[in-house]
Amino acid sequence: MSGLDSAKILQNLREIRLPKGANDIVSEGLVSGVTVKDGTVGFVLDIGKTVLTREEAEALRATCETRVRAIEGVKQAMAVLTAPRTGSVRVEAKSAPKGGVQPPSPTPLAGVKRIIAVGSGKGGVGKSTVASNLAVALAKLGFKTGLVDADIHGPSVAKMMGISGEPEVKDNRMVPLERHGVKCMSMGLLLKENVPVVWRGPMVTKALHQLMRGAHWDNLDYLIIDLPPGTGDIHISIAQNFVIDGIVMVTTPQEVALLDVKKALSMFEKLRIPTLGIIENMSYFSDANGQKQYLFGQGGGKRLAKEFHVDLLGEIAIDPAVSESGDSGTPIAAKDGNAAALSFKAIAKTLADTVRA
Ligand code: ADP
């Protein structure tokens, strides 16, 4: 069969990522010795480069073989495991943060099963809108969901979720305010309105940790964190102190936003937080005939996702109803029948399938 060669096999294996790993198995250097002969494919999976358990290694082998068998022209696929190990699941960090100081170890957050962070390269791309809508959509799917506004410089979650007032304190911990089925905590709730926030470095971080660890989360399946835009101390501090199951990056089709998002993606890769995928917000506009008009160019999110070997989780339309809903304190995902609401629900479902609670 023409076109069936080792490059094609590697290209397909790049779609497979390690459990809890940020990279695909080819980039992690696990695959070697690919041979192709008369439709029979063989390759080596060097499990010694990971700390997978035997069961996980076997599951990975099965996934790889199934993926390769699905390639046109392949009759048989065989993966050989080398140096299988028993023990913990964690994959070693490839690069330690610069500076030479041992960072703190991330620890789980009491009462929370999974944490998904929402980031962006720059401000104004709809990150908070996406974070709020994903939280509401997860709650509508039946998951116990929480939302933390870590975008301390411009907290907008409280407004978007329609919450106000200070959280009640019980047994020395704050009780998150619940709206649209989501338990919310925001710096915005702890500040008097119109007070300018000039938080600096360690103070910001300390405040955020108090917000996260000082709340009664009460057995959440998912906690969504609305990160500040870009890259900075808060991101590093969150990654070093909390076990983050994955990051969702929000971008818009404009090239400048794509450049910023690349920088942020590289940072999360270094921090060893898996990128769950990219959401392209404000992708297109539905015209009167229901035709999609890609005003800012088409396919930017897709190209970026391909470059970083991550999924494009979805494209959200530009729709005045999205911003009106946010402004009025009821995210569009709380409503039925809107195209953007359906996109948010589909993305929430994909996330729940990927990061199982
Ligand atoms: P960020 O958190 O990235 O700074 P926001 O979520 O605050 O961005 O969104 C910026 C503005 O864009 C808000 O006014 C919001 O209502 C609007 N917006 C976000 N997504 C959409 C969309 N898909 N369609 C229309 N307006 C949107």
Image (spheres, rainbow, N blue to C red):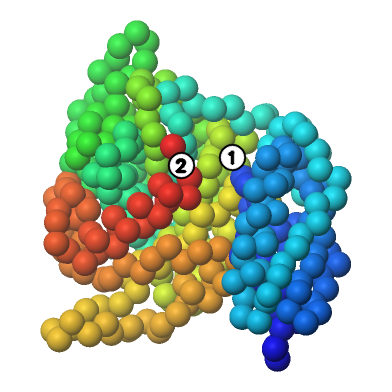
Query: Label 1, on which residue?
Result: 239
Tag nearer the camera, 1 or 2: 2
Q: Nearer the viewer, residue 351 or 98?
A: 351
Does label 1 or label 2 sit earlier along the sequence?
1
Q: In this image, 144 relative to 303: left or right? A: left
x, y percent for residue 223: 40, 37
Quadrant (top left/top right/bottom left/bottom right) for the N terminus: bottom right
Amino acid type for the residue under numbered disc 1 = Ala
User: Looking at the picture, which amino acid does disc 2 mark?
Assistant: Arg
Quadrant in which the C terminus appears = top left
Secondary structure beneath label 1: helix
* Tag 1 and tag 2, C-beta contact below 8 Å: no
Can the viewer see residue 237 in this picture? no
Name the residue tied to disc 2. 356
The picture places residue 334, in percent across and down from the top left corner, at 18, 49
Q: Residue at x 17, y 63 (%)?
A: 338
* 87, above or below 116, in the image: above
Q: Determine whether, in the image, residue 212 is placed left or right of residue 80.
A: left
